[in-house]
Image (tube, rainbow, N blue to C red):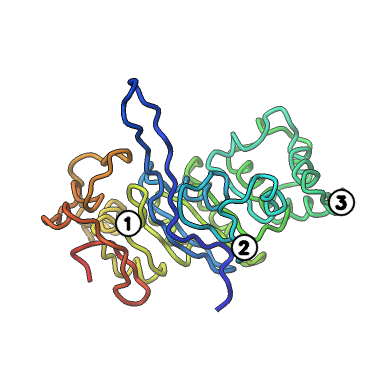
């Protein structure tokens, strides 16, 4: 089996919390806790979970936009965990990101053409090659060439997100992190962007980490899916295996919230009780224990480990396996 494009081993990212009182013990926010994953070339790996579960921090850590507290990150077989900004610079063109808010992704005073050419210039792409690549990408994302002479305020959210995708592809990256790229768009536009990404994935053999809070979106787009809760992965499997065999109570809850289009099929909604635990004072047992409808005493006493229960289906739950 070939080396994955990106691989994380027991990745940890913590943020220090400033003390409110003199002499108060230092605290940390546990954004990502012991996450391991690998993304093979040409595949899309989905990360799904509620807001605040650590999805975006995980993506930024993989790209080394965040310093890493613990664990390892390997890009194309190279350990990039402790590389400095200077050492990371040659790798940046091979690691790109598509952000959630298309309106914040471009300088509002800069023309689209100038913004795209600036990316090519920073990474020393010849000007004539950049012009040809930009025009080819505009064709791929179904936007006219006069788009290059417009400013972001003249574009719709869907058009700007198409341009953000084109900008990410401009340098032929080996790996892309798409951080909830459709959540800020109208529902009608979301489908168009998702279909565009699927078409581009086939044409350019894209390798991607796709972050979303929508189960239906990752099911539609991704080859593998990991479900995150409070900084940890609670379930992970190939997409078809996971959605046909939901094992973790949290994953079952997420799926129960999706409305059905069949009026004759009534889905039983699982309503969670209690509040999301603090990522600063993480409970000693299962992080989902306080909200889990199936919680047992052992769930509050010890944290379940992510284990393979068959078909490369990983679950972190005392009640499964």
The residues bearing labels 3 and 2 have C-alpha atoms spaced at a distance of 27 Å
Look at mark 1 in the image and give the residue it sits on: 261
- Judged left or right of residue 218, residue 80 is right
Which numbered marker is on residue 78?
2
Q: Earlier in the sequence, mark 3 or mark 2?
A: 2
Q: Measured from the top left, where is residue 205 in percent x and y?
A: 63, 67
Q: Earlier in the sequence, mark 2 or mark 1?
A: 2
Q: Where 306 sits versus 188, above or below? A: below
Q: Earlier in the sequence, mark 1 or mark 3?
A: 3
State which mark lies toward you, 1 or 3.
3
Quadrant showing the N terminus: bottom right
Question: Which residue lies at the image location 63% right of the left edge and 41% below the top edge?
Answer: 160
Which numbered marker is on residue 126?
3
Looking at the rendered structure, the secondary structure element under dot 1 is loop
Q: Residues within 10 Å of mark 3 (few under 14, many from 20)?
A: few
State which mark lies toward you, 3 or 2.
2
Quadrant showing the C terminus: bottom left
State which mark lies toward you, 2 or 1.
2
């Amino acid at each position: 089996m070939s080396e994955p494009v990106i691989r994380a081993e027991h990745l940890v990212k913590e943020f220090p919390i400033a003390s409110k009182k003199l002499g108060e013990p230092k605290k940390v926010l546990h954004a990502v806790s012991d996450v391991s994953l690998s993304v093979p070339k040409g595949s899309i790996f989905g990360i799904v979970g509620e807001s605040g579960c650590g999805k975006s921090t995980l993506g930024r850590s993989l790209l080394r936009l965040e310093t890493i507290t613990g664990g390892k990150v390997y890009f194309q077989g190279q350990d990039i965990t402790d590389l400095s900004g200077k050492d990371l610079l040659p790798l940046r063109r091979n690691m790109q990101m598509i952000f959630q808010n298309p309106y914040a992704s471009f300088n509002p005073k800069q023309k689209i053409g100038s913004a795209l050419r600036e990316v090519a210039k920073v990474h020393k792409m010849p000007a004539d090659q950049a012009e040809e690549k930009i025009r080819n990408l505009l064709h791929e994302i179904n936007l006219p060439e006069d788009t290059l002479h417009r400013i972001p305020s003249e574009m719709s959210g869907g058009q700007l997100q198409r341009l953000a995708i084109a900008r990410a592809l401009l340098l032929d990256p080996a790996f892309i992190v798409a951080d909830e790229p459709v959540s800020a768009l109208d529902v009608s536009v979301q489908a168009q962007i998702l279909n565009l990404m699927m078409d581009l994935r086939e044409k350019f053999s894209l390798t991607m980490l796709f972050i979303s809070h929508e189960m239906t979106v990752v099911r539609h787009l991704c080859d593998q899916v990991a479900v995150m809760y409070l900084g940890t992965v609670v379930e992970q499997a190939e997409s078809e295996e996971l959605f046909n065999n939901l094992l973790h109570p949290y994953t079952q809850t997420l799926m129960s919230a999706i409305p059905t289009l069949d009026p004759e099929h009534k889905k039983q909604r699982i309503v969670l009780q209690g509040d999301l635990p603090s990522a600063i004072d993480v409970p000693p047992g299962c992080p989902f224990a306080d909200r889990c409808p199936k919680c047992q005493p052992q769930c509050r006493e010890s944290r379940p480990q992510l284990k393979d229960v068959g078909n490369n289906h990983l679950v972190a739950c005392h009640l499964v396996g």
